[in-house]
Image (cartoon, rainbow, N blue to C red):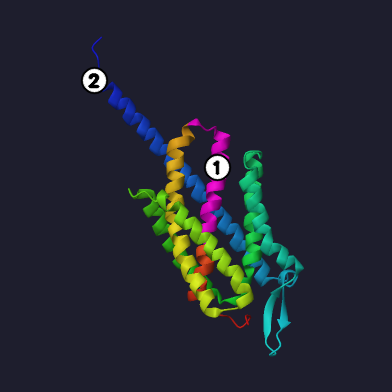
Amino acid sequence: MAFNSNFGRAGTQAGVGSLDAGLRSYMCRVFNWMAIGLVVTGLVAYGVAETSLRALFFHLAETPNGAFVLRPTFLGGVAIFAPLAFVMVLSFGINRLSRSAVQAIFLLFSAAMGASMSSLLLSYTGVSVARTFFISAVMFGGMALWGYTTGANLLRLGSFLFMGLIGIMIAMVVNIFLHSAPLAMLVSLIGVALFTGLAAYDTQRIKINYQQYMSFASQDDIGKLSIYDALSMYLNFVNLFQFLIQFTGVRSSNSD
């Protein structure tokens, strides 16, 4: 039998094609779960803001100067901190949880985020919220596409982005006591830049992790990791939206 010199090359090409197809399928799964999470968040936020459920989460409180501002009730406070609990469960328990449990927790997390973010629908006009969502989607989608296609190594920016994230968290806590409008605007500006960069960074991270490790992972592990990666992208988008609305949002008559 004659030796086929193209055998090795053909096998390599087939393997690369299979890897590319698997990567595209995995990325679609990640962004589909992210989209599902955003839909759940939006529906819950609208349900809380526009129905009688609003009274369970928020009330109007009078300030010393006679103005009325929106304040969370006890249940509203729980809704604000509940997403953090879900994130911790997913982050530390993903190896112990079943795929269906991870999916259920992600959906519950998205619902809790919706209850927490309903205050934005009460504080800003619907048109400005929709406009900000569209701008955020364009910015996020463009950076995610760049992160997927670029040949630049974005992973080396990981420590810089992490330090930026810690810095923003510290500044936000400090400003709780300072009530400085200039500092709040500076934090929002840095937040927009940071989470725009994280959209590209995490997209490339997900891509490289799949190429390096997913061939050894079981289908159940791949299913759970797709939820975890969807959570990362979801958080990037939601934070980008929340910081961006500080610049593009128009206050409604329901706000202070």
Q: State the residue in front, 111 or 70.
A: 70
* Secondary structure state at the residue bearing disc 1: helix
Q: Is residue 51 magenta?
A: no
Q: State the residue in front, 214 or 22.
A: 214
Instruction: Indicate which disc, 1 or 2, sits on the residue closer to the N terminus.
Output: 2
Asked if 159 appears above or below 180 in the picture, the reply is above
What's the residue at 64%, 51% (across, down)? 88
Left or right: residue 63 compared with residue 172: right
Does residue 4 appear in the picture of this structure? yes
What's the residue at 44%, 67% (across, down)? 135
Q: Position of residue 70 (x, y in %)?
A: 68, 77
Asked if 132 appears above or below 142 in the picture, the reply is below
Q: Amino acid at mark 1?
A: Leu
Give the extent of the magenta segment. Answer: 216-238
Q: Quadrant of the N terminus?
A: top left
What's the residue at 59%, 63% (across, down)? 42
Does residue 44 appear in the picture of this structure? no
Q: Amino acid at mark 2?
A: Ser
Q: Position of residue 118 (x, y in %)?
A: 63, 68
Q: Quadrant of the C terminus?
A: bottom right
What's the residue at 42%, 42% (across, down)? 208
The answer to whether the residues at label 1 and label 2 have Cβ atoms under 8 Å apart is no
Q: Quadrant of residue 224?
A: top right
Asked if 66 appears above or below 144 in the picture, the reply is below
As measured in the structure, the alpha-carbon distance from the residue carrying label 1 to the one carrying label 2 is 39 Å
Q: Position of residue 131 (x, y in %)?
A: 48, 71
The residue furthest top is: 1
Q: Which residue is mark 1?
A: 225
* Secondary structure state at the residue bearing disc 2: loop
Q: Position of residue 165 (x, y in %)?
A: 52, 60
Residue 5 has which mark? 2
Number of other residues with Cα within 10 Å of mark 2, as a class: few under 14, some 14 to 19, many 20 or more: few
